[in-house]
Amino acid sequence: MKVRMLVSMASENEVKDVGDEIEVKKEIGEAWEKAGIAEIVEEKKGKKKGDK
C-alpha cells in the first residue's frame, strides 16, 4: 500500500518527511491513516490471471 506522509517521522535508520510517498504493509497504512500520520494514495492490486 502506498501512503503519503502528513507528518515527519525519524528513526535510527531513516527519515520520512511530509509529502513523501512510501510503500508500507496494509495494516501499517491503515493505522497511520487512522492516527492522522499519513493518507492512503493507493492500495496494491493483485495481478490478474493473464497479466505479465
Image: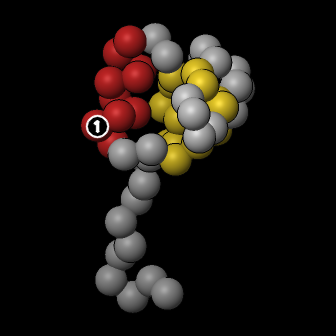
For the residue pair 46 and 7, the one nearer the viewer reads as 7
**Of all residues shown, which one is farthest toward the top?**
36
- Left/right placement of residue 52 relative to residue 10 reads left
Q: Residue at x 51, y 24 (%)?
A: 39
Q: Residue at x 37, y 46 (%)?
A: 25
Which of the 4 quarters of the picture holds residue 47? bottom left
Which of the 4 quarters of the picture holds residue 51? bottom left
Q: Residue at x 32, y 24 (%)?
A: 31
The chosen color scheme is: secondary structure
x and y, in percent, of residue 27 in the image: 28, 37
x and y, in percent, of residue 46 in the image: 36, 66
- Judge whether residue 4 can be spotted in this image: no
In the image, residue 18 above or below residue 52: above
Mark 1 surroundings: few (<14), some (14-19) or many (≥20) residues within 10 A: few
In the image, residue 47 above or below residue 30: below
**Of all residues shown, which one is farthest toward the left?**
27
Which of the 4 quarters of the picture holds residue 29? top left
| Total numbered circles | 1
The amino acid sitting under disc 1 is Glu
x and y, in percent, of residue 17 in the image: 70, 25
x and y, in percent, of residue 52 in the image: 49, 87
**Of all residues shown, which one is farthest toward the front?**
12
In the image, residue 41 above or below residue 6: below
The secondary element bearing badge 1 is classed as helix
In the image, residue 24 above or below residue 3: below
Q: Residue at x 45, y 44 (%)?
A: 24
Q: Which residue is mark 1?
A: 27
For the residue pair 17 and 14, the one nearer the viewer reads as 14
- Judge whether residue 28 can be spotted in this image: yes
